[in-house]
Image (cartoon, grey):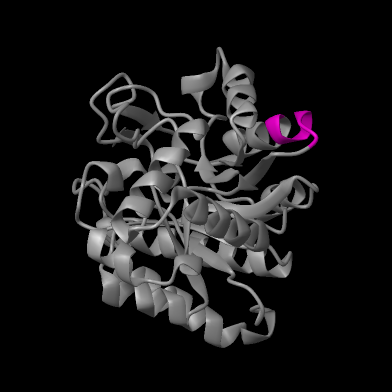
């Protein structure tokens, strides 16, 4: 069994066949966490999760790119190459209400994104807003004893500082027996990975590792129980399906690549990452 720990079947790319995609993944022994990026998609993730007895769960949160209006380049070479973000003010009470549903198992996707900053705007002000909203959602997660799914793009220094200070200030809310957050689609190096591990966090890999060798050494060296696997559906489609819309069932190719890098059987990767995910999300 596999668990895709970060999927967006709740996005518009699946508006015509979301349930078909979900059922195909479940039939392929693949569970999933459907991750929101603003209030609408967070609610939709929960709606889909509530339709299935098991195997489909939701994360709710406000992504940093949705704090400002403007185009967002996804980096994809397809019809999913970008979208227009619409600014949303973070409403703690609204997200708290969604997060209290049984099928809501995390706060996410939240964090910092400096890659998409518009230089024509006050960049320092936008960064400050991202940092403040991120801190509020960290507090929401810990107040509800939920893990947090963290997005970071070109902002690791500030992200680490916020997480470090948060853990010190709210140490009483940080669980000692399990990780309390995951850096989704990890983009750093080995030193950064260990800094996050020491904070009590995990890292996660997407199909990116199937067509880039940048993280091979890291994947070879780190403990297997410190990582999870994901698709970031509909983006980051793994080889041999690059150029097509991604979906949760393809997370097996991420696991297969990790197995190849480490020289172990895919069954061992599946067993380890599934156990880690079930403990992390408590599913």
Residue 37 visible in the picture = no
Across and down, in percent, residue 8 comes to 51, 35
Residue 52 in magenta stretch: yes
In the foreground, 22 or 50? 22
Residue 17: name its quadrant: top right
Query: Number of callouts in the render?
Result: 0
- The x and y percentages for residue 197 are 44, 76
Looking at the rendering, the stretch of residues picked out in magenta corresponds to 48-53
Residue at figure coordinates x 33%, y 22% from the top left: 244
Is 210 rendered above or below residue 163? above
| Residue 60 located within the stretch drawn in magenta | no
Q: Residue 126, position in %: x, y?
A: 35, 56
**Side of 253 where 88 appears, left or right:** right
At 65% from the left edge and 82% from the top edge, which residue is drawn? 176
Q: Residue at x 31, y 19 (%)?
A: 79
Q: Nearer the viewer, residue 140 or 260?
A: 260
Quarter of the image with the N terminus is top right
- Give above or below for 110 relative to 178: above
Can residue 175 be seen here? The reply is yes
* Quarter where residue 239 is shown: top left
Q: Nearer the viewer, residue 159 or 21?
A: 21
Residue 177 in the figure: left or right of residue 69: right
**Which secondary structure is most common in the magenta stretch?**
helix
Q: Is residue 70 left or right of residue 46?
A: left
Q: Which percent across, then down, holds residue 127?
A: 34, 60
Q: Give the vertical position of 80 relative to 127 (above or below).
A: above
């Amino acid at each position: 069994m596999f668990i895709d720990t970060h999927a967006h079947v709740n996005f518009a790319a699946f508006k015509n066949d979301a349930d078909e995609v979900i059922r195909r993944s479940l039939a392929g022994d693949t569970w999933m966490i459907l991750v929101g990026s603003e209030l609408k998609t967070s609610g939709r993730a929960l709606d889909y999760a509530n339709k299935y007895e098991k195997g489909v769960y939701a994360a709710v949160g406000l992504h940093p790119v949705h704090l400002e209006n403007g185009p967002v380049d996804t980096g994809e070479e397809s019809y999913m190459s970008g979208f227009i973000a619409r600014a949303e003010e973070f409403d703690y009470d609204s997200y708290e209400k969604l997060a209290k549903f049984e099928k809501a198992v995390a706060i996410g996707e939240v964090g910092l994104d400096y890659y998409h900053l518009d230089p024509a705007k006050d960049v320092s002000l936008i960064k400050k807003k991202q940092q403040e909203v991120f801190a509020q959602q960290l507090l929401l997660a810990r107040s509800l004893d939920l893990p947090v799914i963290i997005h970071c793009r070109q902002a690791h220094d500030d992200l680490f500082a916020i997480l470090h200070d948060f853990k010190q200030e709210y140490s009483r809310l940080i669980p000692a027996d399990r990780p309390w957050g995951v850096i989704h689609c990890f983009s750093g190096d080995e030193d950064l990975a260990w800094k996050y591990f020491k904070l009590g966090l995990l890292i996660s890999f997407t199909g990116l590792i199937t067509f880039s060798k940048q993280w091979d050494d890291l994947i070879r060296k780190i403990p297997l129980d410190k990582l999870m696997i994901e698709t970031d559906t509909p983006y980051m489609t793994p080889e041999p399906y690059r150029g097509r819309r991604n979906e949760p069932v393809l997370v097996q190719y991420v696991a297969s690549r990790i197995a190849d890098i480490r020289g172990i059987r895919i069954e061992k990767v599946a067993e380890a990452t599934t156990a880690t995910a079930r403990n992390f999300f408590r599913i």
